[in-house]
Structure formats: C-alpha cells, structure tokens
Image (tube, rainbow, N blue to C red):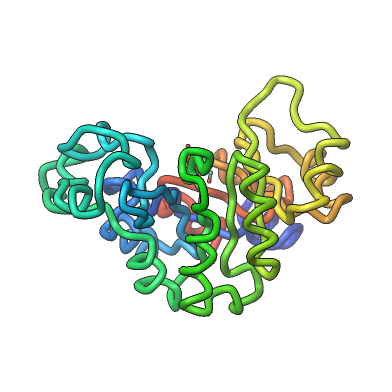
Amino acid sequence: ITDTRIMRKYGPPTLIGHRGAAGLCPENTIISFDKALEKGAHYLEFDVQETSDGKLVVIHDVTVDRTTNGKGKVGSLSFEEIRKLDAGSWFHPRFKGEKIPSFSEVLERYSCKAGFLIELKKPSLYPGIEEKVAAELIKLRLHQLGKDRIIIQSFDKASLMKIKKLLPSIPVGVLVRHRPYGILERECKAISQFAQYLNPKVTMVNASLVKKAQKHSLKVIGWTAQDRQTAEELANTGLDGVVTDFVDVHDSSLK
Ligand code: G3P
Ligand code: CA
C-alpha cells in the first residue's frame, strides 16, 4: 500500500508522540516533547501523577527508580524532591540535568503548538487527581479549545467518568491492553456511554475493530507503533490516531 493510497482512502491519522519522542530522548521530559514536535508530531502523549504535596507531575512509572537517579514512589516524594532528580542520564549521559516536568509547565509550553493526549496514570493512587487536572486545564482555559485538541485517556474507567463530569467538553478515551479475544461489540457500546475514544494496543487494531467502534461513534487511537510498517498497517485500518515513540519513522505516510 503506498502512502497516496492510504491518504486517498482514509485521510491521514493524527500522529501522536508517545511520552514525547521516547525512542529518541528520555521519555516525558521537555527535550523529548520538543523533539517530538520538531519531528512532526501533531499531539504529545504524556502521563500525569501527583507528588506527596499535591503537585501534578509528568512521569510514567509509579516510582522514580527507572527514569531518574532517585528512588521511591512518586506519591511519597515532594515536588521539591522530585525536581532535584536527574531524569535524563539514565537514557544517555548527554541528557544529564533533564527534569521531571510539572503538568502546568507542559500545558503552558505546548498548548499553542500541539494537541495533548493526557493519560491519568494509576489515578486510584491519587484520590482527587481528577479535580486537580480539571482545575489546571480550566485555569489555562484549555477546556475551551474544542476540536479534540485535548484528549484525556486512562485504563481506569471510573476516573474517566469522573473527569468527564468535571470537563464535559473534553473527550475521554479508554485504554485497552492486549487480549486474545479482542474487543467485543458490547464493550464498544458500553464504552460509548461515557467516552469518545477507544484506545487499544496496536496488536488489536484492525479494520473490523475500527468499524465496530465507529458504529458506536467512537474514534480509535492505537498504541504504540514502533516501525513504519506497523504505522502503515494501522493507517490502512482507518483509525484516527497513531501513538509512536519514533515520530520521524512515520513522517511521510502520516503527516
Ligand atoms: O497512549 C497509550 C500508552 O501511553 C499507554 O501505555 O504504558 O505507555 O502509558 P503506557
Ligand atoms: Ca501513557
């Protein structure tokens, strides 16, 4: 399938930089988000959690162990402690000094440049995080942007239902991990009662799933395509967005 055929048949899906440009830079850092945009991402995907003193920060794991020089749970460390950590060297010494960004920093720096796919990561660990996320988006008036410029996603459906009540104008997406039996029509129907997106692992995305989702007015974002062939196959299913660690791998087919 050539790029032109993909485009003619379905139109290009939205290109979403996973944790920024996680294949090229330390994930969920400013340098990673800058790189994703430089390489042509339309949206930035990132993960939000909360420090012990109630500040929202952008980090994937529930501990800082893998992606910083520190140790401990995100929810047990203060914002000051988190900000002292080096979130770059683990990836490569040349990224030494990269910080874990605050949620507000990312919103302020990129809201005029990109769309956001914001993941509420393990929200059950942080009671009330939905209110905090909503308050920050409202403070910057980002809830008024429209056109799906901000999408909130999570594996936690209860949390998504909560945030949808707080921010009715912002679309929400249900993340679904791989399972051998795929995603059933009745699940699409149930999800469509409160969500606007179905966001499955790429191994489950095919034209029939996209059709099933569309039948219930759900858009589909697949994660995470790591090579051009997967991106092209995904685009050919007619889905709406592709999450990738390597934005540049996909540039000519999906922009
Ligand atoms: O955008 C989907 C993806 O981010 C979900 O998985 O583990 O990378 O947060 P994970
Ligand atoms: Ca994520």
Residue at the spot 31% in from the left edge and 55% down from the top edge: 32
Which residue is at the front of the view, 221 or 5? 221
Residue at the spot 47% in from the left edge and 54% down from the top edge: 45
Report the side of 137 relative to 70 (left or right): right
Return the x and y of residue 132 as percentages of the image width and height. 48, 61
Q: Quadrant of the C terminus?
A: bottom right
Query: Is residue 156 at all visible to an observer of this figure?
Result: yes
Query: Is residue 225 at all visible to an observer of this figure?
Result: no
How many tags in the picture? 0
Report the side of 166 relative to 209 (left or right): left
Residue at the spot 38% in from the left edge and 59% down from the top edge: 36
Of all residues shown, which one is farthest toward the top? 180
Return the x and y of residue 86 as percentages of the image width and height. 15, 46
Q: Is residue 68 above or below residue 178?
A: below
Q: Is residue 166 above or below residue 109?
A: above
Which residue is at the front of the view, 126 or 212? 126
Return the x and y of residue 153 as percentages of the image width and height. 59, 50
Return the x and y of residue 245 as percentages of the image width and height. 42, 45
Residue at the spot 15% in from the left edge and 42% down from the top edge: 89
Report the side of 223 relative to 220 (left or right): left
Which residue is at the front of the view, 145 or 237? 145
